[in-house]
Image (spheres, rainbow, N blue to C red):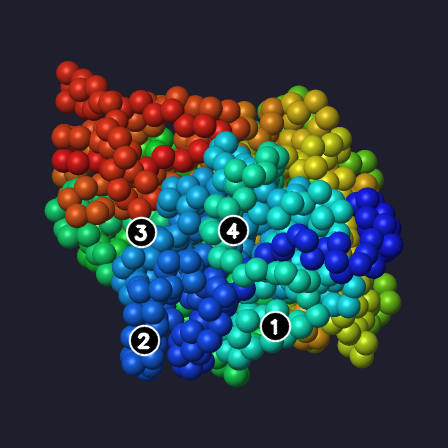
Amino acid sequence: MKRKKIHHNGVLLLFVFLSAASLHAQTAWFVDGYHGGVYGHYPLWQARFMVEELTKQPDWKICLEIEPETWDTVNVKDADNFKTFREYYETTGRYGRIEFVNPTWAQPYCYNISGESIIRQFYYGMKKIRQYFPNASFDTYSVEEPCFTSSLPQILKGFGYKYGVLRNPNTCWGGYTTAFGKDLVNWIGPDGSSLPAVPRYACEDFSTVNTFSTRSNDNSREFIAACFADGIKFPVGMTFQDAGWNHGPWLEKFIKDFYHPSVYATWTAYIDMIKDKVTPVDWHFSVEDVKPGLVWGAQVLQKIAQQVRVSENKLIMAEKMAAFNCLLNKTPWPTDDFAEAWRTLMLAQHHDCWIVPYNGRPGNTWADKVSRWTDASNRIADTQIAALFDTDEKSSAIRVFNTMGFERTDFVTMTLPETADGVEMVVRDRHGKTLPSQMLTNEQGQSALQFEATVPGMGYAAFELKQQAKHSSRSSVNSVSSGTLTIETDFYSATFDADKGGAITGLLDKKHHRRQLVANGKTLNNLRGYFYQEGQFRGSADQNATVTIEDDGALFIRVKVENRIAENTSLQRITFYKKHPRIDFELRIDWNSQPGIGAYDQSDNYKAEERKKAFYNDEYKLQLLFPFDGLGDRLYKNAPFDVCASQSENTIYHSWDSIKHNVVLNWVDVTNASGDYGVALFTDHTTSYLQTDALPLGLTVQYVGKALWGRNYRVDGPTCIHYALLPHADNWNQADIELSSAAWNEPLIAGRVNSPNDLGRYSFFSLSDKKMLVSSVTMDGDDLLVRFYNTSSEPQKENVTWYFNIRKIDFADLNGNACAEVGMEKKPDGTTVTALQLPPFGFQTVRVRF
């Protein structure tokens, strides 16, 4: 493998042994620094140590990637040394000796969280650093872990960054980036934003002795020789040491046998030096250029991803609701509450939560902390949302809020108190019309009413809750334990086969020429995985199931499938809506023991240095299978502020050195070759998807076995996930899949209000096109900050109509600073219209002054 790689890059093995004299005529560079923080690793002697070493080593320079909250702790527990470090930074460090490169609050991987979360990671982190280092500048983004995503150029430029570094050579346990280019590239994001960046060179191979580094981590003579041979004029290596390592300068203290001369530099100084001496090539960096190797399907990671997703959704909705409250009721903006809610959510997005979830003492592992952190964020979000409603359960007035920018008709769920026998609750609109509704039991076992409501964009509509005599109940439950059961809606005809584990053997799309979605002889929504203790694949279609129509009302039909998978009980609920094409799924598996699920058993032979590992192979994990007929020629998946057209033929890999991007953030979409029909799969958590030559799409459910650092990834309680399918005409862009996913994650919010005569509708502002998403709404003093995101792969012109009196609107950067005035058109009806133009996948923030 080594010989093949070197010859592929045009470097003869003989070149490694060129005389020292021929190499010494050329200089190489090296970037050193420290990574860590109070939550990861940061000893209290670190500040003193850095000042002492920098003073002793006048040619040494360092970049810092330290969790910003660390400085709060150090300021209290190591005040004198921290004061000395701050003084050193102000007088000497910031003039080329010390550079802050990654100010995010918790060093997230980025590709696995929302775009808004990434923005807040930078915003709050930079603010905290400047609290202690007021003259800190942020010019070059560089990281120790693979903390990358495709939209970072747009985000970084929004915060004033000039450069980037697209490598993480000394910590590749969790993945790495594609090898590409030479000295510099133009790092181009999906919106067209571009930054000069140092790539992981095309000639930068993996280490031959470990599974965590690439060749630029030590400036070896072999690596620098390979760089010069490949035409790299200014080769540079890097390592960010863990805070707490006491080596001092990395090369002299740890490597020793490195290339000479190697000159230490900060990243910004290095790129400033070479940017006019080389010609960067354009690199349209895709999210698939990030190769993440986490333990997808591990239950602990699954729960973390679900908890983070819930908090992300709640917090974005809570901010919008709090802005409504400020505008409606003149309440003060809860700055401190939201800062704390974001703090705990950002900590739950820490890369260590995702790659070493079991680390820590019992009861205080990263996974335990994520539960506490997200619970804290959720409490604050719930409080802010509840502030717009009344606690009086006797009130019959209801307000339903829509936190998206366009009018939508969707389902609303409200918890109800107990009612008298013979009485049921119904909802009426402002015209007195009774709305379609259906009783159900929520996840907490409480009675709830689900009804359909039409609500204007970024506003609310009022409704009335009424009691009436209960109508006769629906027909008796239909249940089968053998044979088939078919349900019909205006959208679908779906056939469940109890003899095949209750899987869907037929799914006709009535709205699109009665297209059959299930490939001939296949089963849709079947669970299948390799149980290595048994030495065989097991599937839910291996035995009979009980299939029951659990509910059939005005809004939906719900089918329950009770089954077993390898002697473990499984329960699925599939909901078909009467007036919506989305199909919702819930899955619960109750494990009666510790299974072994994966490619093979590594209980006794896991070795970190071996490249091939069982947890890399998704094909053997427990998967939900979707053998769609005629689909899969094209696959699209969303990423933070992006949608990627996959270039991978499949997602299968077995080894650390061949990782593929197989991550589904919110959704993945498969279409036919002509792009005129497809199906989107929504998921309630970041995980991996499966695509093979034989299978258009699968969703990873479970891996149980040894993985990173030999940890035994076990099941601890039931596995519960939610997902959905949305068949559609045309491609994802024409079908507005990104907006549909956003609506799935931001449901309508309803509550009682003490306004019995309010049966009106109100919108604060609305959008003219469903391609635009209201990414966030916050307040800054008396001003409203609104961020719009173009979800389309095409440029969009968007008219925003504001329904309240406005004095001025400015474009703002991601720090909130006004950049340029936005043109406004005052209408005779008192509204104000502004026109926005956004590039594909671009976002814009506006500051609205009243």
Q: Which residue is mark 4?
A: 270
Disc 2 is placed on an element classified as helix
Instruction: Kindly identify the residue that appears in the image at 58 percent across and 70 percent down.
Output: 250
- Is there a contact, CB below 8 Å, between mark 4 and mark 3? no
User: Disc 3 on helix, strand or loop?
Assistant: helix
| In this picture, residue 578 sits left or right of residue 214 | left
Mark number displayed over residue 84: 2
Relative side of 537 to 752, left or right:
right
Q: CA distance from mark 1 to mark 3?
A: 52 Å
How packed mark 3 is, by other alpha carbons closer than 10 Å (few <14, some 14-19, many 20 or more), is many
Look at the numbered discs 3 and 2 and tell me whether their residues touch, using CB distance below 8 Å. no
Residue 321 in view, yes or no: no
Q: Report x, y in % for residue 635.
A: 67, 36
Q: CA distance from mark 2 to mark 4?
A: 27 Å
Q: Amino acid at mark 4?
A: Tyr
Q: Nearer the viewer, residue 123 or 766?
A: 123
Q: Residue at x 26, y 42 (%)?
A: 817
Q: Secondary structure at mark 4?
A: helix
Q: CA distance from mark 4 to mark 3?
A: 43 Å
Q: Which mark is residue 318?
A: 3
Q: Earlier in the sequence, mark 2 or mark 1?
A: 2
